[in-house]
Amino acid sequence: MENWPILSIITFTPLIGVLFILLINAEDEIGRRNIKLVAAYTTLVTFIVSLLIWINFDLTTSSFQFIEQYRWLSGSITYHMGVDGISVLFVILTTLLMPFCILASWHSIKFRIKEYMIAFLVLETLMIGVFCSLDLVLFYLFFEAGLIPMFLIIGIWGGAKRVYASFKFFLYTLTGSVLMLLAIIYMYWQSGTTNIVELFNFDFSTASQTWLWLAFFASFAVKIPMFPVHTWLPDAHVEAPTAGSVILAGVLLKMGGYGLLRFSIPIFPIASDMFSDFVLILSVIAIIYTSLIALAQEDMKKLIAYSSIAHMGFVTMGIFTFTQQGIQGGIFQMLSHGLISAALFLCVGVVYDRMHTRSINAYGGIVKNMPKYAVFFLILTMANIGLPGTSGFVGEFLTLLGVFKVNTYIAFFATTGVVLSAVYALFLYKRVFFGTLQGAETKTMNDLSYREFYLLLPLVILIIFFGIYPAVLIDVSAVSVENLINNYNNALLIKG
Amino acid sequence: MTGLFYLPALPELFIALGAMVLLMVGVFKKEKSYETVSFLSVLLLTSVLVIINLEYIPLGYAFNSSFLSDDFSNYTKSLILLSSIGIIIISSGYLKTIGIMKFEYPVLILLSVIGMMVMVSSNDIISLYLGLELQSLPLYVLASMRRESKKSTEAGLKYFVLGALSSCMLLYGLSLIYGFSGSILYSDIASFLSENNSNQGILFGLAFLTAGLAFKISVVPFHMWAPDVYEGSPTTITAFLASAPKVAAVALFTKIMVNCFPSLIDQWQLMIIFISIASMLLGSFAAIGQNNVKRLLAYSSIGHMGFVLIGLATGTISGVTGLLIYLTIYVFMVIGTFACILSLKVNGTNIESISDLSGLSKVNPMIAFVLSMFLFSLAGIPPLAGFFAKFYIFLSAIESGLYALAIIGVLASVIGAFYYLRIIKIIYFDENINVFEPITKRMKLIIYITAIPVILFFIRPSLITDIAEKAALSLF
């Protein structure tokens, strides 16, 4: 078991599913059903295999585990995989959300199912690769390649303005990333390696750290997304099919936060320290500004998209406090937001499949004929607000705890974001579920089907479970985060 | 000098003889002369490709040192041969459609190939010029091959007039260089320059030489002929113009700069940086508004040559390695893309405008997928080969400290990504309006042969990068 290339197996299992799908003829109904089944089983198997790394994960060490290294590009650019306490949970999050994406698309995707499932499985491979790679070039490869399937998912199966949204998504992300590519190459010539583990111990000069940090930040800030480069996200979310939104909010946004933790802070500690106020201020602006925008939205998906930006603001804020609580809170917030936003987008998908509109005004009073749905949505709304007892609370609380230690003003303004999130989330709930039924069509809406019910149930259970017993997740990242902060403080001490 | 004095030039002589024999075959064989000659020329080129790569032919000097065969020339010759083979194979269907199945066509390509091979092996300025002209003259004829088409005639004429002008400039530059240095051999000029570093006459000649070569690879500000010629020429010749002659001209450019003017790097580096930046930007911006596939690919190739020249601008081994890797991948991408475009026919004619591609993915998902992979690769998106091409180029640019060039380069590649995405959007997002005719086996073969290395390059990049590095080393 120890010598198995387990991370590569997890990463490339979805591609095996792709091979099978390629062999199936999608002309008839049976073939299409088989394609869906193969995709569903592939993602399930990937998830189960990925649980093995969680089970075998050594909580006591901060070093990388399950390491694989093979010759790849040139001597020092290698195929290098491994996970530590920071990345392992993101791998699990990715593999966990994928079966939901496949099941959510079961009936809602009506054409080109073969291509759709292939795109999702390829995307899964690339996302897992991002979190596992320990080489900058390999990381960049996975990070960028994800654009292709996501571009196609939004563009082919998206809504009315899908072309605009897909182009915006692609070009925004690409612009940020190419600067990171140059930074990676510069680092290669400076240090002679792109091995992340070796780069942790390499001291870049203060001046070059500044530029490198900015180049990496350009890429991650677009991905997270942070104010003021967040404008692609609402468009992409609104136009993407339900499963596309789930994966976008659930995993793709987290790559940005993960990147900050994996590269920006450990490799450029001095620049990170220098820019920490800048990031904190941007985060607070994002929290308040996007919460206010969310209030004014008429489209359910757009509202959740803006609330995602606000929640990711808590993440960046927590990370750049450089405290144990802040960073762990940031990681927890990312994981919990991955579950909550995924579940919320699935919920929107449920009513969208029935009514084919996401406009809030088209609904109203649907609690009468969709009670089960109303209960799920209420729990998720509360989790989104950050009610104690749900996982949303833990992340926000920890990040705010971290910020209070560092900067009270920032913490004060950030806390208003919590209130604002309650305002927009409850307002949304009230307008959709209470009041009188709007129009004849809403009256005929049925409550959740079995498939939808069992799709939402596990997510809701997990959200509550992690809210009550967050230690399961926090313990995993504790040692790695502690090590990260120690190294960061040491680097600052040496520079004086 | 041991053995036969012409031995290293045997591949060129072999093709020259073959071309003449094929001319006779074409004349005496009344029926199906095109098919026979085209098959035999593919056979001829393939056998030369094999001979070169199995290293049966000794490397070294020939013809009193005016010809040098080394790893560098062998590498670029292989590329030239590969692309010519690809072009001849994809030509027949297209030529049948437009009704010019003439046996001169493959023979002219063969003659042009000899010119290119002489160019990349040239070791003095006479063989340089001879090779260049031998390369160009058949191309003028090929460009105007569709005699009944006004556009083709215009393309041929334009190409000829501007090509002649560029040859004049080149010749003028070469004569200055010869006049001031007193030698035609690259090595003698280089050693003369290392002693007399600031010779105004030679600098003047260098500028003219650069301008003449920039014409041949159609980079800004000498690019104006490319879109018109590309649009007017028969599409297969457009594909040829975009691949093999560019490889030859860039290789020659690299060779003469590195071998002949290493001590003047400060002077020519600036020129090349300017050419490179201007080409990348123009290639990206001007292509956005194009609706004709051939014009678009013309601008795209201008942009790509801009990226290639970054490698030359560094003047280092890793720069030349990057340049060679870029050229290799570029040739595969361009021929693959053209093969896809050529294989798509609506109502008996080949498609010309981008909007004809709309909804292709619904009718022919396989070709749509491969074509969009080529386009993503041209845009430089990982994990496709086009990304690695750019990666190695930027690797060398950053190594040499050309940061501004690298930053402008990546931003230009983002702008460039936009118009490639536009085509992918038309293929995948738009509704289908056309009924495409089925694709012939021969076209499929070429499409897949070019697609596999482009898509799977990331698995073993060292297969190509190691050879390219060896080739680059032999130049220094």
Image (tube, coloured by chain):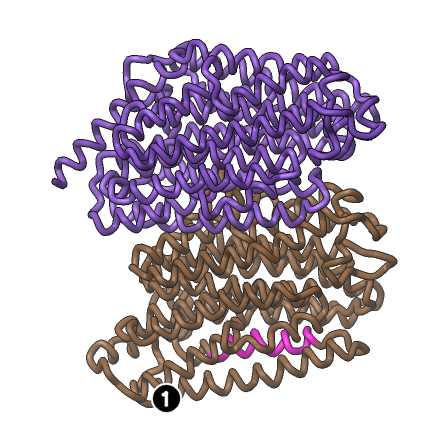
Chain colours: A purple, B brown
Quadrant containing the C terminus of chain B in the rendered view: bottom left
Which residue is at a point 49% across and 16% down the rendered structure image? A390
Image x and y of residue A467, in percent: 46, 14
**Left or right of residue B106: residue A145:** left
- Residue with the mark numbered 1: B176
Image x and y of residue A424, in percent: 56, 31
Q: Identify the image quadrant of residue B69.
A: bottom left
Q: Residue furthest right?
A: B347
Looking at the magenta stretch, what is its main secondary structure? helix
Q: Residue furthest front?
A: A435
Amino acid tagged 1: Leu
SS under mark 1: helix
Would residue A157 be counted in the magenta stretch?
A: no
Few, some or many C-alpha atoms within 10 Å of disc 1 (few <14, some 14-19, many ≥20)? many
Along the viewing direction, whichever of B65 and A398 lies nearer the viewer: A398
Vertical relation: A20 (above or below) B22: above
Q: Which residues are magenta?
A: B129-143
Quadrant containing the N terminus of chain B in the rendered view: bottom left
Vertical relation: A252 (above or below) B311: above
Is residue B365 in sight in this rendering? yes
Image x and y of residue A113, in percent: 73, 31
Along the viewing direction, whichever of A156 and B311 lies nearer the viewer: A156
Is residue B6 in sight in this rendering? no
Which residue is at a point 29% across and 59% down the rendered structure image? B401
Name the chain letter of the residue that bears numbered label 1.
Answer: B
Which residue is at a point 34% across and 39% down the rendered structure image? A280
Image x and y of residue A58, in percent: 33, 13
